């Protein structure tokens, strides 16, 4: 009886060894696939970062906050949401600042309120400047050529003097 049991035990050890080797091989393949995916994701992130840097370089408003803080030493950039600083960055303006449409756009809709779902009251065009009457987070309220007040999303324009 011992003689017949020995080949079964050996076969069990061999089978266990083969299963472990296959398991390690599968883990190795999965690791390689994950490394390849990680490399692809890193390449995509690098492209996005380069695109963002190029857009920032082409955007005349880049570094606007640094310019504001350099001009106004009382501006505390560590507390942007304080009432004093908020009034410097948002709200009504009478300093003659205007907005122009970014060169990557030919025309953009302007709205009755600070919601893109609100009524469209006109369009602004490239090459023109529009006086800012108020700021609100990511929006500018401007005066159109016909005297109508309208809101434009900040992402489409840059400030000029």
Image (cartoon, rainbow, N blue to C red):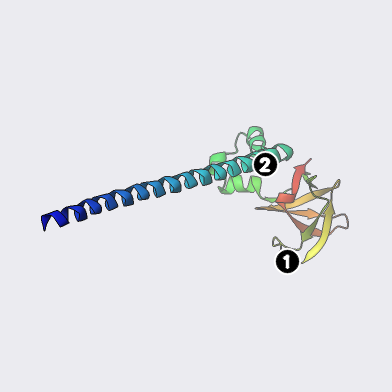
Residue 66 vs residue 52, the one in the foreground: 52
Q: Seen in the image, is 24 located left or right of residue 98?
A: left
Q: Quadrant of the N terminus?
A: bottom left
Q: Which numbered mark, 2 or 1, is in the foreground of this view? A: 2
Q: Which residue is mark 2?
A: 51
Q: Residue at x 65, y 42 (%)?
A: 52
Give the SS element for disc 2.
helix
> Residue lying furthest left in this view?
1
Taking the image as drawn, is residue 95 in sight? no
Tell me which numbered mark, 2 or 1, is placed earlier along the sequence: 2
Residue 113, image quadrant: bottom right
Q: Quadrant of residue 70?
A: top right
Q: Look at 59% across and 46% down and name the residue there.
A: 84
- Name the foreground residue: 143 vs 124: 124
Pinpoint residue 51: horizontal percent, then vertical percent.
67, 41
- The furthest residue to the right: 146
Residue occupying image coordinates x 41% and y 45%: 28
**Residue 12 percent across, percent down from the top left:** 24, 54
**What residue is pinned by disc 1?**
118
Q: How many marks?
A: 2
The numbered mark at residue 150 is none
Contact flag, marks 2 and 1 (Cβ < 8 Å): no
């Amino acid at each position: 009886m011992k003689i017949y049991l020995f080949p079964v035990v050996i076969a069990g050890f061999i089978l266990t060894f083969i299963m472990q080797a296959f398991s390690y091989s599968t883990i190795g393949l999965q690791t390689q696939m994950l490394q390849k995916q990680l490399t692809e994701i890193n390449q995509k992130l690098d492209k996005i970062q380069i695109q963002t840097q190029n857009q920032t370089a082409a955007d005349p408003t880049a570094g606007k906050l640094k310019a504001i803080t350099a001009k106004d030493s009382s501006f505390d950039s560590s507390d942007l949401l304080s009432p004093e600083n908020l009034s410097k960055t948002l709200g009504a303006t009478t300093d003659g600042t205007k907005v122009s449409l970014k060169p990557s756009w030919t025309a953009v809709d302007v709205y009755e309120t600070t919601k893109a779902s609100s009524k469209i009251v006109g369009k602004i065009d490239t090459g023109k400047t529009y006086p800012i009457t108020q700021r609100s987070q990511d929006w500018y309220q401007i005066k159109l050529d016909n005297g109508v007040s309208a809101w434009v999303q900040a992402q489409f324009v840059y400030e000029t003097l």
